[in-house]
Image (tube, grey):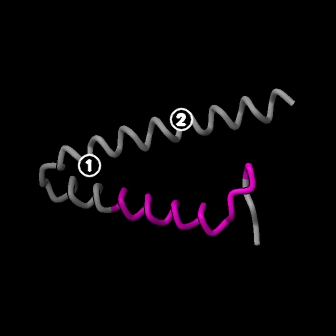
Amino acid sequence: MTTYSFGVPGIAVWTSHLLIGAFLVYIGWTLNKGRPLNKNFAIALIVLGALAMLYHSHLVYYYNSK
């Protein structure tokens, strides 16, 4: 089985990508239909975006400082 940075199993990475992708599809579908977006979903998008930026910044720093 494949592992990613810091030994994270591939199945965890793939599952999280599928779940986040499904969440983004739902939000896109909701907005495309002209329905208002639930405030909790907007907050979840902000949190996911911030976590993605922090995590990838950490990876860039970690692998470039070696």
Local packing at callout 1 (Cα closer than 10 Å; few below 14, some 14-19, many 20+) is: few
Q: Residue at x 39, y 40 (%)?
A: 47
Magenta region: 5-25
Choose between 42 and 29: the one closer to the eye: 42
Residue type at tag 2: Met
| Residue 20 part of the magenta-drawn span | yes
Answer with left or right where residue 34 lies relative to residue 46. left
Magenta stretch, main secondary structure, is helix
| Residue 10 part of the magenta-drawn span | yes
Q: Position of residue 6 (x, y in %)?
A: 74, 49
Which residue has dot 2 on it? 53
For residue 61, above or below residue 56: above
Figure quadrant of residue 63: top right
> Which disc, if any, is residue 12?
none
Answer with left or right where residue 33 lies relative to residue 20. left
Choose between 9 and 20: the one closer to the eye: 9
Residue type at tag 1: Phe
Q: Residue furthest bottom?
A: 1
Local packing at callout 2 (Cα closer than 10 Å; few below 14, some 14-19, many 20+) is: few
Q: Position of residue 19 (x, y in %)?
A: 44, 64
Which residue has dot 1 on it? 41
Q: Position of residue 54 (x, y in %)?
A: 56, 33
For residue 3, above or below residue 60: below
Task: Kindly state the secondary structure of the residue where label 1 is placed.
Answer: helix
Q: Residue at x 46, y 35 (%)?
A: 50
Figure quadrant of residue 45: top left
